[in-house]
């Protein structure tokens, strides 16, 4: 796997911090969504670029870096930070199934798309960890020291970015029989270690969510979160992909963001946009949601493209971005030890 061109490698200067409003950009949502011009939106402070392992490494050992290269070059030109999220899980490459990796086949249940059957690797499978780890190390070798890369959202612990393993009763039982929560905890901690090795200069964040909807999953998730926070202080961060107007310290996810805001990188992704059938999930206006993120001491909030591009929200996004920056004491970071 070739190294990055010199122009995309970091200088020895500081990394940009992940602060403010981040434009939520997905390369799977159509050609307009992966255009670097989104960095020029004056209402946002940066951008989170989402892609997938099966898009970047369609054959083993041969990675297509072109989209990430283009986005980071645009970030540099705009003098804005970028986050990077590469999904594994059901978006692992097809060739993985032929490597001996232990796969789970189950139902991908999402409110915004029809339920369908997918396969994904178990996070604790050692062959999977070897292959996913090789990709992450190549990714880190190419981009870790790039000053525009403000954070990386972790993946590989569930069927998407969030570490959810199963939702239906049948899939939860399959998960339990394959190793269940003890194996998931062990595998997740090993994946955290892989990210730590691959990204020594870039914060890597867990998008917190329970792997299954059973009572003992609360403790399992907390164990994984505590492992990362304690073993990699100031490097392992946390975020929640469910910001709405009701964010409160009474909720584990919100409380974990708030309680670690002075220790490491923390943030949110909006639960949904103000458009579409799931807009009711916001439980209030976009302003209510963003203000709740400020109240929980987030460093950044990822906001869906449709809202970032809406002129009606321009003044609001700028105001909230300024508030997030003013309360965030973790300004530009030097090399992480």
Image: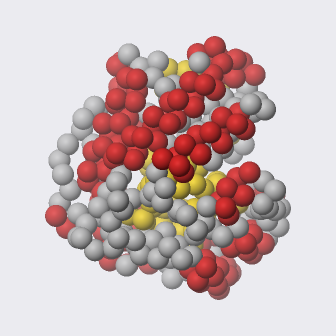
Q: Is residue 311 visible?
A: no
Identify the residue shown where x is 25% and y is 66%.
Answer: 10
Q: Decide if residue 189 is on the left or right side of residue 14.
A: right
Q: Is residue 170 above or below residue 157?
A: above
Picture layout, residue 107 above or below residue 2:
above
Is 125 above or below relative to 67? Answer: above
Which residue is at the front of the view, 123 or 232? Answer: 232
Identify the residue at the far top of this view. 177
The quadrant of the rendering that contains the C terminus is bottom left
> Residue 276: x and y, percent?
73, 57
Image quarter where the N terminus lies is: top left
Q: How many marks?
A: 0
Location of residue 297 by image quarter: bottom right
Q: Which of these two is toward me, 29 or 11?
A: 11
Q: Nearer the viewer, residue 234 or 58?
A: 234
Residue at image coords 53%, 62%? 264
The spot of residue 139 in percent (x, y) is 31, 48
Colouring used for the render: secondary structure
Left or right for 26, reference 70: right
In the figure, residue 114 lies in which quadrant? top right
Residue at the extreme front of the image, as rendered: 230
């Amino acid at each position: 796997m070739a190294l990055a061109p010199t122009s995309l490698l970091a200088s020895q200067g500081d990394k940009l911090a992940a602060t403010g409003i981040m434009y939520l950009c997905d390369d799977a949502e159509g050609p307009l969504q992966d255009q670097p011009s989104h960095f020029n939106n004056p209402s946002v402070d940066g951008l989170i670029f989402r892609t997938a392992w099966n898009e970047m490494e369609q054959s083993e050992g041969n990675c297509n870096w072109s989209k990430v290269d283009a986005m980071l070059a645009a970030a540099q030109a705009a003098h804005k930070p970028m986050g990077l999220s590469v999904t594994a899980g059901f978006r692992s490459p097809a060739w993985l199934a032929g490597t001996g990796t232990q796969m789970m086949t189950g139902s991908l249940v999402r409110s915004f798309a029809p339920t369908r059957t997918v396969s994904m690797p178990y996070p604790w499978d050692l062959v999977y960890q070897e292959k996913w780890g090789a990709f992450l190390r190549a990714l880190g070798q190419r981009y870790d020291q790039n000053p525009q890369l403000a954070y990386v959202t972790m993946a590989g612990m569930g069927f998407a970015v969030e570490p959810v393993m199963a939702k239906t009763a049948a899939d939860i039982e399959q998960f339990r029989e394959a190793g269940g929560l003890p194996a998931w905890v062990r595998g997740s901690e090993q994946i955290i270690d892989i990210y730590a090795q691959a990204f020594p200069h870039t914060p890597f964040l867990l998008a917190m969510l329970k792997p299954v909807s059973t009572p003992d999953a609360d403790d399992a998730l907390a164990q994984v979160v505590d492992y990362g926070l304690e073993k990699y202080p100031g490097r392992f961060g946390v975020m929640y992909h469910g910001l709405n107007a009701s964010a409160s310290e009474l909720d584990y996810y919100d409380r974990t963001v708030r309680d670690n805001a002075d220790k490491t990188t923390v943030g949110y992704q909006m639960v949904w946009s103000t458009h579409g059938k799931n807009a009711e999930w916001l439980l209030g206006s976009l302003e209510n949601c963003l203000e709740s993120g400020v109240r929980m001491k987030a460093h950044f909030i990822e906001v869906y493209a449709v809202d970032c591009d809406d002129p009606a929200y321009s003044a609001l996004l700028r105001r909230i971005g300024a508030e997030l920056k003013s309360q965030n004491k973790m300004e530009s970071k030097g090399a992480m030890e």
